Amino acid sequence: MKSGKVWGTTQLIENNSSLEFHRIEFKSNHCCSEHYHKTKWNGFFVESGVLMVKTWQEEPTETRKNMLCDQTVLRAGDYYKVEPLKWHQFVGVEDGVAFELYWSEFSGDDIVRRTTGQKID
């Protein structure tokens, strides 16, 4: 099922406990909202057209509206990922199609110990 957006359309291909996978059709001179994800990575693989991904290190405030912004331009075959908690936005430079992925990483060091293992006599 396709969902309309101001910047184009998104079609959910897969959604499970490990990832979300979308096909997006984006329009030139249109953008998504500036946002971040608390725990999810956000990846973009461009099939056609030109897509720019903007990223900011922190949220702009009233006193710091002109924050440093990185701009990565993606063309057919290019891939880029945005880490959790990083403000980002995609912008259509030329009409196109991309695949958008979301996933959270499993952390092997997520254990919090209250005691240590020991031999019990």
Image: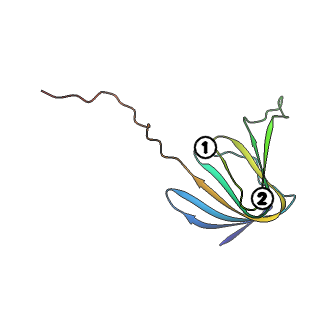
In this rendering, position of residue 81 left or right of residue 75: left
**Amino acid type of the residue that numbered disc 2 sits on in the rendered structure:** Arg
Give the residue type that dot 1 points to: Lys
Q: Which residue is mark 2?
A: 75
Q: Give the structural element (helix, strand or loop) at label 1.
A: loop
Which dot marks residue 38?
A: 1
Q: Say which residue appears at 62% left-offset and 57% top-offset.
A: 101
Q: Where on the picture, by quarter, is residue 93?
A: bottom right
Query: Which residue is pictured at 39% across the width and 32% down the height?
Result: 112
Is 70 situated left or right of 44 in this image? right
Labelled pair 2, 1 in contact (Cβ < 8 Å) = no
List x then y, in percent, for residue 56.
75, 39
Quadrant in the picture for the C terminus? top left
Q: Element at badge 2?
A: loop
User: Mark 2 Cα within 10 Å, few/some/many (few <14, many 20+)?
Assistant: some
Q: Is residue 68 toward the left or the right of residue 37 in the image?
A: right
